[in-house]
């Protein structure tokens, strides 16, 4: 084995994995504590905290988050497809501005976007009235860049001649979309949807400002509960919140082949 | 002459202020194989895209079997096209790729199956129907693209540099194959290429393009042996060009006297070029012969020259020369073991008057 830089690289990689997987493993272990405190290594073994994680107190915000994320992902995709087409295929006045505004939340701190949206809703007097819809709008705003970008990349990756070939073979504009364009960008569309879902599901910054009591995403619920210290329930809940996106991505990867989009810049068939 | 399959009339396409296609007239006869040949940026691909309908012309007309099509969208033009990158649908099998055009034409399912298998047989790909494009080699993809374009029995075939992505050996195989197939089906074809070898070997006629115009159109022999302009002469093959002045008018045998700095000459001329006109005298390297000083045959035009370098290419020898006035020239000969020339040697470079060609046009 070569030494020097190689050893350093290997140690660095090992350290990165340790810091990614270590905390998750510890959290998972902690959730099985038989005591009231979050000991590691866990003292005794019990499913008590998992039982608590599945109690209405937690299941309700968890389901709320799932529903919010699903709805956000669908809206972000439905709005994202035409936007991606417009940005990728057409020139129109104000394109640069609209694109910057659409993709802006990608680089702005979500905290700022959240505060700004709250201020805005208060100023125009819709803050109280909108409630859930305000939260949904907020989530769509911060998730839209993910779907637009991913769909735009898949459009870009598709060779233009493929659509020309379909046209040349007698396919009208709608037939080209249906038989060629959509099937080819579908992995990108689903990947964008998954990104949007995950981003919404894991968001705390936006929800913190917009969510109202009784309609709290699980992240906000966990955050509030933290005021009382880190209980093993939270450990169980964290693992649960981790598993949901993982399962989603695994399913999509299995059935629509979005893997290319998640793990590298562009995917091609 | 029968009505042409395709007629382009004063076709113009501008991109901004630049005219990519600057007024093209072209008629392709039924069953004819016409090549648009030229360097990149000459407008050949733009012309093809205008015919296919991917671009709208800024002026002129396109007629297909006597019917104007420039207003028709591309999907109603009924042309089969093979793209440079083949443009196969990556998410479909070979069968589905080939069937696509028939499906769009709402052909009955059993007829689609029959015609697809016929088409795959035609390009020697029977048995490959279930594969995906990414499971095929470059040559096989090329054949699928060809089958997909032909299966719809299009009015004509458009080929956009279809061989440029293949390696040399395969490219030569596909040249012959496409030519044979085209002749067998008797389908009028427009072929775009920048490769003179493809153009010369495959075409019935070649249109040499530059700056959005057709410089010359003619059979491969016309283009190679009787180039109309210096551009055509130098774009196709290599050529020796010597500046000169016409002295006297053309004789009945089509030969004219030309005074050049390398010496006086007799050469073929197309039409009548007035005496005193400055011209270029051209001789293909394989028609320029070398001999010992004083040993040129009777009736040949003989010039003194010095051997600069001998380039060995295996089957051929290229002898680089300098003529008496300093003009560089090249003689190419078969490496048959009889030729022995050395750098610095004084020789005569000679040619038969019928082997030299006078180009009058400037540029």
Image (cartoon, coloured by chain):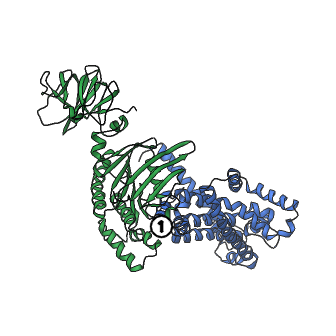
Q: Is residue A23 left or right of residue B31?
A: right
Image vertical order of residue B213 relative to residue A197, above or below: above
Which residue corresponds to the image point at 33% horizontal and 55% vertical from the top-left? B33
Percent of width and height locating residue A234: 71, 69
Label 1 is found on which chain of the structure?
A
Q: Which residue is mark 1?
A: A170
Q: Nearer the viewer, residue B139 or B68?
A: B68
Element on which disc 1 rests: loop
The answer to which quarter of the image holds residue B113 is bottom left
Q: Nearer the viewer, residue B343 or A213?
A: B343
Which residue corresponds to the image point at 49% horizontal and 54% vertical from the top-left? B61
Q: How many marks?
A: 1
Q: Which chain is green?
A: B
Q: Nearer the viewer, residue B65 or B78?
A: B65
Bin the neighbour count of mark 1 within 10 Å (Cα to Cα): few under 14, some 14-19, many 20 and up: many
Image vertical order of residue A106 relative to residue A248, above or below: above
Percent of width and height locating residue B111: 38, 78
The answer to which quarter of the image holds residue A43 is bottom right
Q: Is residue A5 visible?
A: yes
Tint of chain A:
blue
The answer to which quarter of the image holds residue A227 is bottom right
Which residue corresponds to the image point at 88% horizontal and 59% vertical from the top-left? A123
Which residue corresponds to the image point at 21% horizontal and 31% vertical from the top-left? B353
Percent of width and height locating residue B149: 39, 64
Q: Is residue A159 visible?
A: no
Percent of width and height locating residue B144: 37, 64
């Amino acid at each position: 084995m070569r030494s020097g830089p190689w050893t350093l690289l290997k140690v660095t990689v090992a350290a990165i994995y340790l810091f990614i997987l270590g905390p998750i493993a510890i959290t998972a272990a902690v959730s099985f504590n038989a005591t009231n405190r979050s000991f590691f290594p866990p003292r005794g073994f019990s499913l008590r905290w998992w039982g608590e994680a599945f109690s209405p107190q937690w299941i309700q915000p968890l389901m709320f988050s799932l529903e919010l994320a699903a709805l956000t992902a669908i809206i972000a995709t439905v709005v994202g497809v035409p936007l991606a087409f417009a940005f990728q295929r057409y020139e129109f006045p104000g394109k640069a501005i609209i694109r910057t505004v659409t993709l802006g939340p990608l680089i702005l701190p979500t905290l700022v976007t959240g505060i700004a949206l709250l201020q805005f809703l208060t100023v125009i007097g819709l803050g109280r009235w909108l409630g859930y819809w305000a939260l949904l709008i907020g989530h769509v705003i911060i998730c839209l860049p993910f779907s637009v970008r991913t769909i735009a990349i898949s459009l870009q990756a598709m060779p233009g001649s493929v659509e020309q070939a379909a046209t040349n073979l007698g396919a009208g504009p709608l037939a080209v979309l249906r038989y060629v364009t959509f099937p080819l960008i579908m992995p990108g569309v689903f990947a964008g949807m998954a990104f949007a879902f995950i981003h919404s599901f894991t968001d705390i910054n936006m929800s913190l400002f917009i969510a109202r009591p009784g309609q709290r995403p699980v992240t906000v619920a966990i955050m509030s509960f933290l005021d009382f210290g880190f209980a093993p329930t939270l450990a169980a809940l964290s693992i649960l919140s981790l598993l949901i996106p993982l399962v989603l991505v695994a399913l999509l990867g299995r059935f629509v082949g979005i893997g290319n989009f998640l793990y590298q810049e562009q995917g091609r068939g | 002459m029968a009505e042409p399959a395709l007629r382009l009339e004063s076709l113009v396409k501008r991109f901004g202020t630049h005219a990519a296609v600057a007024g093209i007239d072209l008629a392709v006869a039924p069953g004819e194989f016409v090549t648009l040949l030229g360097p990149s940026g000459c407008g050949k691909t733009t012309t093809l895209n205008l015919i296919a309908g991917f671009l709208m012309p800024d002026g002129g007309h396109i007629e297909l079997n006597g019917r104007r099509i420039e207003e028709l969208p591309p999907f109603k033009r009924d042309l089969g096209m093979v793209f440079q990158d083949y443009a196969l649908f990556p998410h479909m099998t070979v069968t589905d790729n080939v069937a696509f055009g028939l499906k769009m034409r709402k052909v009955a399912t059993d007829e689609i199956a029959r015609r697809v298998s016929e088409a795959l047989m035609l390009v020697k790909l029977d048995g490959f129907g279930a594969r995906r494009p990414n499971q095929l080699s470059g040559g096989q993809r090329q054949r699928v693209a060809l089958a997909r374009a032909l299966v719809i029995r299009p009015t004509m075939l458009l080929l956009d540099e279809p061989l440029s992505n293949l390696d040399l050996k395969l490219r030569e195989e596909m040249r012959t194959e496409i030519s044979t197939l085209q002749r067998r089906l008797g389908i009028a074809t427009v072929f775009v290429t920048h490769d003179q070898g493809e153009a010369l070997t495959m075409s019935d006629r070649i249109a040499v393009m530059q700056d959005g115009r057709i410089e010359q159109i003619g059979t491969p022999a016309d283009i190679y042996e009787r180039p109309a302009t210096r551009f055509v002469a130098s774009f196709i093959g290599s050529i020796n060009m010597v500046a000169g002045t016409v002295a006297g008018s053309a004789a009945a045998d089509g030969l004219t006297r030309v005074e050049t700095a390398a010496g006086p000459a007799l050469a073929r001329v197309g039409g009548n070029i007035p005496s005193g006109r400055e011209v270029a005298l051209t001789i293909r390297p394989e028609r320029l012969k070398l001999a010992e000083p004083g040993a040129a045959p009777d009736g040949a035009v003989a010039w003194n020259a010095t051997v600069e370098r001998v380039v060995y290419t295996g089957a051929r020898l290229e002898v680089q020369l300098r003529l008496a006035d300093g003009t560089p020239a090249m003689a190419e000969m078969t490496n048959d073991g009889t030729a022995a020339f050395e750098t610095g040697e004084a020789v005569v470079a000679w040619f038969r008057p019928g082997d030299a060609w006078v180009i009058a046009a400037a540029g």
